[in-house]
Amino acid sequence: MEEWVGKQWDRFIRRAAQRQHENAAVELGEVQRSITLMFRAAGGAAAVRVAPAGARKVGGARHWLERVAGTGTHAATGRLEPEVLSLPPRIAVHADAALNRALYLWLAALAAHIAPTGDWIADNRRATQRALATFPGLAGRYRQLLAAECALRPDPSGLRGRAAEAEHMVRRALKDRESDTAADVRPEEVAPVWLWLDTAAATVAPAACRPDPAGAHAERPASKQDPRRRRAQAVADERDKAPLLMFFRAESIFSWGEFVKVNRASDDDDDGNALAAANDMDLLAIAPDGQTTASRVKFDLDLPSAAADDRPLGPGIRLPEWDWRRGQLIAEHCALQTLVPVDPAPFCPPPALRVTARRVRRRMEVLRGGMGHLHAQPEGEELDLDAWVRHRVDAAAAPHSATPAVFSRRVRSERSLATLLLADLSLSTDAYATQNARVIDVIRDALYVFGEALSASGDPFEMLGFSSVRRQNVRIHQLKSFDEAWNARTRDRVGAIKPGYYTRMGAAIRHATVQLAARPERLRLLLLTDGKPNDLDQYEGRYGLEDTRHAVHAARTAGLTPFCVTIDAQAHDYLPYLFGSAGYALVHRPQDLVRRLAAAYAALTR
């Protein structure tokens, strides 16, 4: 009873202390597409993703009800980082829903123009001026937002000491007035400024600088996922500084607890309170201790022994990689090895897949080079009337040849087309796409059907699969080369594909570009079935996206036509940046991958 009364009281007092306008609340998910469009249109980096922000400590005066309820100390405000634009998961600070929606769009425009220098107030003032110069149409909405923001601000006369001074500086900046000492103000010293972004540099070490213990990025057991961004700080692990110091009483070593068989909790177990504890912390401290949950399953991700692995072809290839932080292409940064399956088992496609293959094959046969006419020929089967009329007109003005080119003849027109299909064989393909089939099974079926169809078209083609384990182990699985025929041997290789490791897509695309650029055909297609770029080392997030985009741009510069077909429901967040809005196709149902792949091929070859 006491617990029930306490919960009811807590719910009542929190509701009474609430200063948000729930009826006018706008969720981030409702406007995320518009925010992304505004951010990109204003010149924001296309690789920066939008994510919900976590609550952080804020200052400002609190109402007596908030002090009783223990609320008003934290708020989720906007924050710009090199790879993420963190925005409030919901905005309900204004009574008008249109203003809350406009505030989201304003923060997106502001983020595209902000240039952090360490001076929070000055950075936002300059970004405000730039945003209004870029989008003059936002001036009216901004004035409304500014008036609403000033109405929310606490009165400096009711504050004391440093809080009053900081609030006075913020008010002067909102009115676009200079302040010499504004550089000392931090966001946590004042009440939330909803019109501004936190420009403090991320205190957590980037992935490239943090130690990478073995298996740290390996597959982890399923756990609760929370997309919110939280502030973190890299700290040193001090536990090994005094290894001889004992933190227990010696007489408790041999206790009954050591002999009782109990189900002790391990690091793999979810105690249910970790997420709540993270929400209560202002700053998460991260210390590399060399021990990770994934280290217990690391053996599942190690490379197989040489006896069990595919057979390597050649000594390997060194490839460059684009580092967007340095703005340069690092030469010979990745080591790539081409592999071929050793004695793959015979592949026997099911009857339904054979029917699909025959149907797509008949469609592709239509694309074969057909019969065409050569006009204005000196000899042929038919008279070319247009050429004859031109000949008679020209003959009246000048002497004409004894063998006029006034005939037409039928010839077989030959297409000049080469295709390279690059398939993602990473760990993500081991997930189930449908209730009965994994992603790797869908890709296997698509490769088989596509091989049958391309063999019918008569165009040369090559099939490669790829996965990686850091930059020194980029693995290219050769399923069919340009010089090989589509036969039982190559079909068996397709049937033997299995989920690999990770997705270093930039290196795979660069290797495919080299292979395809050497072909003499006029039109060269590079088709991909993809997963999002990621690997164990720093190849994740914006680093992987920027490298892949650089590789795609290099392929286009080499005269190739890259096109991506994916079943990833979240692909619209990153594929337009990598391949362009017309350079990819999203398959909503995995079983439609074969049809969409064939349709994309037919459209690109017209």
Image: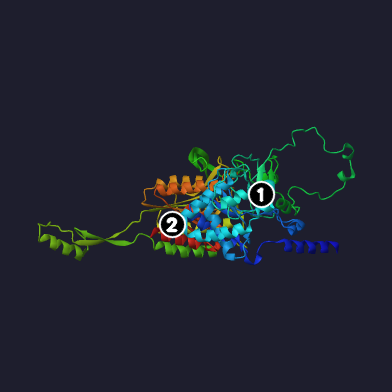
Measured from the top left, where is residue 206 in percent x and y? 60, 42
Q: Nearer the viewer, residue 10 or 236?
A: 10
Report the residue marked by disc 1: 164
Q: Disc 2, disc 1: CB below 8 Å?
A: no
Give the answer, above or below, for where 206 lies relative to 383: above
When asked about the image quadrant of residue 214, the answer is top right
Mark 2 and mark 1 lie on one chain; the one further toward the N terminus is 1
Residue 366 lies, with reference to residue 509, above or below; the image says below
| Left or right of 516 in this view: 260 | right
Say which of marks 2 and 1 sits in front: 1
Residue at the farthest front position: 157
Q: Is residue 596 left or right of residue 72?
A: left
Residue furthest to the bottom in view is 23
Classed neighbour count for the residue bearing mark 1: other residues with Cα under 10 Å, few (<14), some (14–19), many (≥20): some
Splitting the image into 4 quarters, where does residue 433 fall?
bottom right
Residue at x-position 66% and y-position 46%? 232
What type is the residue that disc 1 sits on?
Ala
In this image, 580 relative to 231: left or right? left
Residue 455, numbered circle: 2
Q: Is residue 489 visible?
A: no
Residue in view at x 66 percent, y 49 percent = 164
Residue 313 is situated, as x and y percent measured from the top left of the image, at 50, 41
Quarter of the image containing the C terminus?
A: bottom left
Q: Secondary structure at mark 1?
A: helix
Residue type at numbered disc 2: Ser
Pointer 2: residues within 10 angstroms few (<14), some, or many (20+)?
A: some
The answer to whether 33 is drawn above or below residue 302 in the figure is below
Foreground of the two, 410 or 501: 501
Q: Position of residue 186 (x, y in %)?
A: 63, 46
Q: Nearer the viewer, residue 462 or 273?
A: 273
Q: CA distance from mark 2 to mark 1?
A: 77 Å
SS of the residue at dot 2? Answer: helix
